[in-house]
Amino acid sequence: MIHDTVFSPSFGNRPSYLVGRDQVLRGFLDGLSTQPGSRDRAVVMLGQRGSGKTVLLWELADRAAELGFVVATPTIVSEGMLDRIIEKIQESGARYGKQQARTRISGASVEAFGFSVGLEFTREVQETRTPEYKLTLLARALSERGHGMLILVDELQANSEEVRQLVSVYQELVGEGLDVALVLAGLPGAVSATLNDRVLTFLNRARKVSLTPLALGDVDAFYQHAFEQLGIRLDDELRLRAAEATQGSPYMLQLVGHGIAVRAAEDGSVSPEALGVALRSARSDFENDVCETTLVALSDRDVAFLRAMCVDSDTSNIGDVAARMNVTPDYAQKYRKRLIDSGVIEPAGWGRIRFAVPYLADHLRAVNDDLMTGGA
Ligand SMILES: Nc1ncnc2c1ncn2[C@@H]1O[C@H](COP(=O)(O)OP(=O)(O)OP(=O)(O)O)[C@@H](O)[C@H]1O
Ligand SMILES: [Mg+2]
């Protein structure tokens, strides 16, 4: 069996090569080089499951660190998030914090600005001050030393007190003119709910970046290179079939690539049959990990709406969907909006919608068929 050293189909796993995200990455880095306070320094990134939000945040962390930023690597929204961010800033900023820890005034050792050693707080600050205050001290100390502070947040949650806390303090730091930047990433639904949060109106001015499907040409070019590197021979037509099967999903790209690699013959050849098996297996994993997980997060009514949609082969008319659900078109509009907000469907011209998650329509059709035939 060929040893797969290229593909790694697993969430959050850094890919050996980041396909098709040069522009997005450049956009982030350009944002970091703008003046503190510029709206390009606060970015909200949204993308479906498996679109590569987490790996892009990690890539950004590395690139920003190379530019001299002190980075709080991707922190998942959870209780105590601010404390975790503070620890990460202290840790990654330690190498810049050595200079000027204490100043001597008339022979007595005075702790400078709440710090004892480097970016460690004095005991008074550590034990009695709020996380907001600590983060402000860190931002001031780093700005004074000419270093920006970048905070990366992953898996944004709607209605999160931690996110409100973070965004409020970020806003204050911007107000002080400090060198700070913030990137928040999440599923479209969570992002849309966050932007609608009364307390977070500030974020509406942030830049929104949508992770769109990868271009077919980028996927195909990557496959060509990757298979060559693994000693796998796949003729152009079969390779294109593989690239098309990914439907631009980075996760599917990894699943398909890995599936092919493990099914290639010892001499590197891949038969059309082996390719077929690889594609079916990748698709089944994708339906399980992405489609099912997407459906589980939706209400029964939302799923009923999607079921009513999947009867159509490409786009659906909202009136037809309403009729199939036995509801008024007005009523159906509510579901339409919610599902668009959550990135599961998208508008497709006047009064029409289509699925936005690869293979979701097929997955639902298969489930419908099963129900009809009484299968599992
Ligand atoms: N640009 C890319 N090129 C190649 N592979 C990628 C790319 N982006 C992501 N991947 C791969 O796709 C998979 C999913 O990536 P990731 O975990 O970052 O997605 P995500 O958007 O964070 O998903 P979730 O919403 O479930 O957290 C991983 O296996 C990762 O290696
Ligand atoms: Mg993720």
Image (cartoon, grey):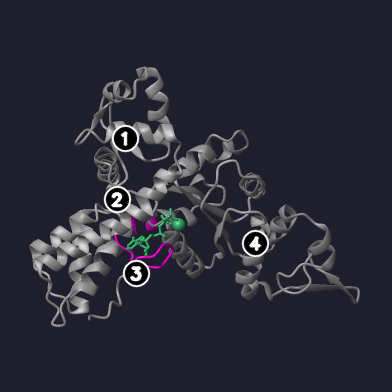
Near mark 4 (Cα within 10 A), the count class, few <14, some 14-19 or many ≥20, is: some
Q: Main secondary structure of the magenta part?
A: loop
* Label 2 – label 1 distance at C-alpha: 23 Å
Q: Position of residue 247 (x, y in %)?
A: 24, 52
Relative placement, left or right, of 29 versus 362 is right
Within 8 Å: ligand 1 and the Cβ of disc 3?
yes
* Label 2 – label 4 distance at C-alpha: 32 Å
Q: Which mark is nearer the camera, 4 or 3?
A: 3
Q: As rendered, which of 311 and 64 lies closer to the eye?
A: 311
Let me know if residue 191 appears in the view: yes
Highlighted range, magenta: 8-26
Query: Which residue: 20% across, 55% down?
Result: 245
Q: Amino acid at mark 2?
A: Pro
Relative placement, left or right, of 67 versus 371 is right
Q: Amino acid at mark 4?
A: Arg
* Label 1 – label 4 distance at C-alpha: 42 Å
Tell me which label, 2 or 1, sits earlier in the chain.
2
The residue under label 4 is: 84
Q: Amino acid at mark 3?
A: Ser
